[in-house]
Image: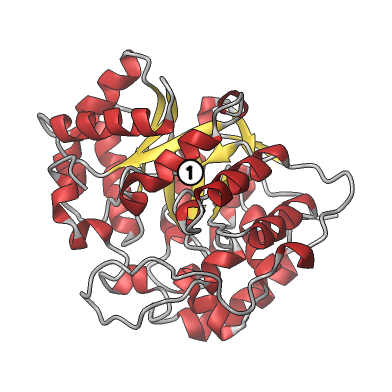
């Protein structure tokens, strides 16, 4: 059996690494044919053809969720994380609650969310799902858009109320997609002041950031954190089977995170549905692919029980991919990924929520 690579091994073989994956459902969501600069994508309309139904997936008897350490925090979290956006896709709130609780009952401990998802509905539904003792079973994360201290503080208070908790385990600055974001966030009166103060006050435990645009922006954020002496605990970024071939987070950022002991969170595993359209790799392979990296969590967006069960099955059956399999997958995806045309979050503004809603950066109004 091929062993999962250590951080040291990864640093010497980053070029052959695989991308992070997430739930197959994310790949199957309907995508609107928007042009570059058209703004954020419209919300999914509902189940698409090909998505597994609940009865289509049989979980292995005695399945065990793999656990990993969240970087230098030392906290143990589930390899599989439940994405917050997709849980609010169902019209029925009770279905959202059912999804969250089913995931927790089957070993998922890492929950993702964001202040702006579905205009706050994602946090509200997750907060209700975490009642009745479920909050104590999870590691809860959410994200904030505000770039100033005052805005970030106001958004955080809203998130705490919606999630019905006194403490959020991890809060990340959302959509670090502009080269000026690091300076704004770390500058006088910037959002980082709000997060540091909230951590001292016991409202949050750890601090991180997310982004999907350009690995150089991630590196600038990491350098700014080092210069300001405010260490980051986690970083979230898109890593998928196309990423190594264009503007690669895997090649440029992941080795730095591994070296610094920062927890790695993955997103956009199917490149907004583009990989599923090509059929170049299977959904299970897309999930096992990232799990073979020194990642902390593979976050999945699941809007139905069938899709959630598929992700759980992938986690339960995970075995690290060997180097030959990795090479074969990268060879198959080289042409598709060469120009970034299938990673629209890198090459267009389609996925930039704060571009479509710039007031999220400066106010706590949705």
Q: Secondary structure at mark 1?
A: loop
Side of 189 relative to 258 (left or right): left
Q: Residues within 10 Å of mark 1 (few under 14, many from 20)?
A: many
Which image quadrant for residue 55?
A: bottom right
Image coordinates for residue 291, horizontal then vertical, percent: 65, 53
User: Which residue lies at the image location 20% right of the left edge and 74% below the top edge?
Assistant: 37
Image coordinates for residue 346, horizontal then vertical, percent: 33, 68
Work out which residue is located at the far right of the displayed protein and give it.
61
Colour scheme of the picture:
secondary structure
Q: Is residue 326 above or below residue 132?
A: below
The residue closer to the viewer here, 281 or 328, is 281
Work out which residue is located at the far left of the displayed protein and give it.
188
The residue closer to the viewer here, 91 or 33, is 91
The residue closer to the viewer here, 163 or 10, is 163
User: Which residue lies at the image location 36% right of the left edge and 51% below the top edge?
Assistant: 117
Image coordinates for residue 87, horizontal then vertical, percent: 51, 52
Side of 185 relative to 215 (left or right): left
Q: Is residue 222 above or below residue 283?
A: above
User: Which residue lies at the image location 50% right of the left edge and 47% below the top edge?
Assistant: 265
Quadrant (top left, top right, bottom left, bottom right) of the N terminus: bottom right
Image coordinates for residue 224, horizontal then vertical, percent: 24, 38
Residue at label 1?
112
Which image quadrant for residue 25?
A: bottom right
Work out which residue is located at the far top of the displayed protein and give it.
201
Q: Is residue 287 above or below residue 3?
A: below
Residue 261, visible in the rendered structure: no
């Amino acid at each position: 059996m091929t062993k999962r690579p250590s951080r040291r091994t990864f640093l010497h073989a980053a070029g052959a690494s695989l991308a992070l994956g997430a739930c197959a459902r994310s790949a199957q969501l309907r995508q609107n044919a928007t042009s570059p600069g058209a703004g954020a994508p419209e919300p999914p309309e509902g189940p698409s053809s090909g998505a597994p139904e609940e009865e289509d997936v049989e979980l292995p008897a005695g399945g065990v969720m793999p656990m990993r350490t969240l970087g230098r925090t030392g906290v143990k979290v589930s390899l599989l994380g439940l994405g917050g956006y997709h849980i609010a896709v169902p019209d029925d709130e009770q279905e959202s609650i059912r999804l969250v609780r089913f995931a927790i009952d089957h070993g998922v401990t890492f929950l993702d969310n964001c202040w702006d998802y579905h205009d706050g509905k994602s946090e509200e539904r997750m907060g209700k799902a975490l009642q009745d003792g479920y909050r104590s079973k999870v590691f809860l994360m959410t994200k904030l858009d505000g770039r100033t201290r005052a805005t970030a503080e106001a958004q955080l208070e809203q998130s705490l109320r919606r999630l019905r908790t006194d403490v959020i385990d991890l809060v990340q600055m959302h959509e670090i997609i502009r080269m000026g974001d690091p300076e704004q966030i770390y500058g006088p009166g910037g959002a980082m002041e709000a997060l540091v103060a909230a951590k001292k006050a016991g409202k949050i435990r750890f601090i991180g950031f997310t982004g999907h645009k350009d690995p150089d922006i991630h590196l600038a954020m990491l350098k700014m954190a080092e210069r300001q002496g405010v260490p980051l605990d986690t970083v979230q970024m898109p890593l998928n089977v196309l990423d190594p071939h264009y503007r690669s987070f895997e090649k440029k950022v992941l080795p730095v995170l591994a070296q610094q002991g920062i927890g790695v969170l993955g997103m956009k595993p199917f490149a907004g549905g583009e990989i599923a359209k090509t059929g170049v790799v299977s959904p299970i392979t897309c999930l096992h692919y990232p799990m073979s990296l020194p990642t902390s969590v593979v976050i999945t967006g699941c809007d139905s029980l069938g899709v959630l069960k598929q992700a759980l099955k992938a986690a339960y059956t995970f075995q690290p991919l060997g180097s030959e399999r990795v090479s074969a997958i990268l060879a198959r995806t080289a042409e598709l990924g060469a120009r970034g045309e299938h990673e629209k979050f890198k090459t267009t503004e389609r996925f930039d929520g704060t571009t479509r809603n710039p007031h999220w950066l400066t106010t706590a109004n949705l």
